[in-house]
């Protein structure tokens, strides 16, 4: 951990409480972790998964229920991958862990032409291996390190390039219905995670070892959201709140709302408040997740309430 001045330590404590509050609220809202769960924390070596592991370990100590944590890393045999980093770190903090060794790198290089983005195939292979390992390890929940900004980026990627109003759910069931995937960082801002990981000096492993191009589409979306966040503070919070306040009658999906049968008699009155900004913004303000003070709730109360 960095050596901090008194003021910096005070600011770090506020940051830490805020992140714990966000994770606790997400776990509570989506019932992510239950008594007796065995949680696989998927650790990539990046800032997000390190932060997720750190906060889940804190909540594990404070929660009134019992749940186990096992950190799992997939060594995909990319050239130059520092295989010693994660085992050394996890042993130093006393966390149960498993390193899975699978040469997906060779498969990806064989299947994807040179210069093309490898992320899609690599992700699918990784997911399959993690699901298989979860079954072997008796895992009940698979925790991924996607945060609020990832969810918003995915929403815009699907709208702009996929023609779907689809994001990244905080909790989901795998296609084969055998696994529950959770995203405890769903309410956490990326900029908070960046600061947190820098101060705690996590041993970050770069994600560019495979030599593939960065996903240009996601990069464009990320830059757009970051610009909005700088120019219009609070906009991303409001946008994320919109994901949690869906009015099916004001979209155009006939499978979600029966427009054909809509008459004056069946009208439910949603249109009266559809464009009322107070209705849209108020729920985000009520959550107060990103406040710097400790007035909403302490992390102790959240940890008890959460799980």
Image (cartoon, helix red, strand yellow):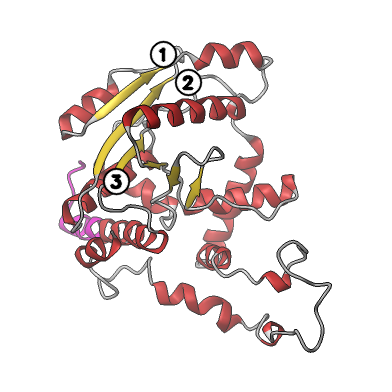
* Quadrant assignment for the N terminus: top left
Q: Which residues are magenta?
A: 1-13
x 34%, y 49%: residue: 195
The mark that comes first in sequence, 3 or 1, is 3
Give the label on residue 209, or none: 2
Question: Considering only vertical position in the picture, is 31 above or below 260?
Answer: above
For label 1, the SS is loop
For label 2, the SS is loop
For label 3, the SS is loop
Question: What's the magenta bit mostly, secondary-structure-wise?
Answer: helix
Count of numbered circles in the view: 3
Q: Which residue is mark 3?
A: 37
**Nearest the camera: 7 or 254?**
254
Q: Do callouts 1 and 2 mark residues in contact (Cβ within 8 Å)? A: yes
x 53%, y 76%: residue: 281
The mark that comes first in sequence, 3 or 2, is 3
* Quadrant assignment for the C terminus: bottom left
Question: Considering only vertical position in the picture, is 222 above or below 303?
Answer: above
Which one is in front in this view, the residue at disc 3 or the one at disc 2? 3
Q: Is residue 235 magenta?
A: no
The mark that comes first in sequence, 1 or 2, is 1
The answer to whether 260 appears left or right of 144 in the picture is right
Percent across and percent down for residue 251 are 73, 67
Give the label on residue 80, or none: 1
Q: Do callouts 3 and 1 mark residues in contact (Cβ within 8 Å)? A: no
x 44%, y 50%: residue: 190
x 25%, y 55%: residue: 12
**Nearest the camera: 39 or 165?**
39
Percent across and percent down for residue 268 are 69, 84
Q: Is residue 223 visible?
A: no
Q: Is residue 185 visible?
A: yes
Q: Is residue 9 magenta?
A: yes
């Amino acid at each position: 951990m960095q050596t901090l001045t008194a003021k910096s330590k005070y600011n770090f404590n506020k940051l830490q409480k805020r992140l714990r509050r966000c994770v606790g609220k997400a776990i509570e809202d989506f019932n992510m972790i239950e008594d007796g769960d065995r949680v696989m924390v998927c650790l990539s070596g990046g800032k997000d998964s390190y932060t997720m592991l750190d906060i889940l370990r804190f909540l594990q100590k404070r929660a009134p229920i019992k749940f186990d944590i096992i950190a799992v890393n997939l060594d995909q045999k990319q050239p130059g991958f520092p295989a010693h980093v994660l085992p050394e770190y996890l042993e130093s903090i006393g966390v149960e862990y498993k390193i899975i060794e699978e040469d997906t790198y060779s498969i990806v290089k064989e299947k994807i032409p040179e210069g093309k983005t490898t992320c899609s195939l690599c992700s699918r292979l990784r997911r399959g291996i993690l699901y298989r390992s979860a079954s072997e390890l008796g895992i009940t929940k698979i925790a991924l390190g996607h945060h609020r900004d990832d969810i918003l980026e995915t929403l815009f990627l699907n709208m702009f390039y996929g023609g779907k109003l689809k994001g990244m759910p905080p909790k989901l069931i795998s296609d084969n219905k055998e696994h529950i995937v959770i995203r405890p960082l769903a309410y956490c801002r990326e900029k908070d995670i960046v600061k947190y990981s820098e101060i705690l000096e996590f041993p970050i492993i770069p994600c560019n070892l495979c030599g593939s191009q960065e996903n240009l589409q996601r990069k464009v979306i990320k830059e757009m959201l970051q610009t909005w966040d700088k120019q219009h503070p609070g906009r991303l919070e409001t946008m994320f709140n919109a994901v949690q306040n869906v009015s099916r009658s004001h979209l155009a999906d006939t499978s979600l709302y029966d427009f054909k049968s809509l008459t004056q008699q069946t009208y439910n009155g949603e249109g009266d408040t559809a464009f009322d900004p107070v209705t849209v913004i108020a729920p985000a303000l009520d959550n107060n997740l990103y406040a710097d003070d400790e007035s909403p709730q302490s992390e102790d109360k959240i940890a008890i309430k959460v799980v």
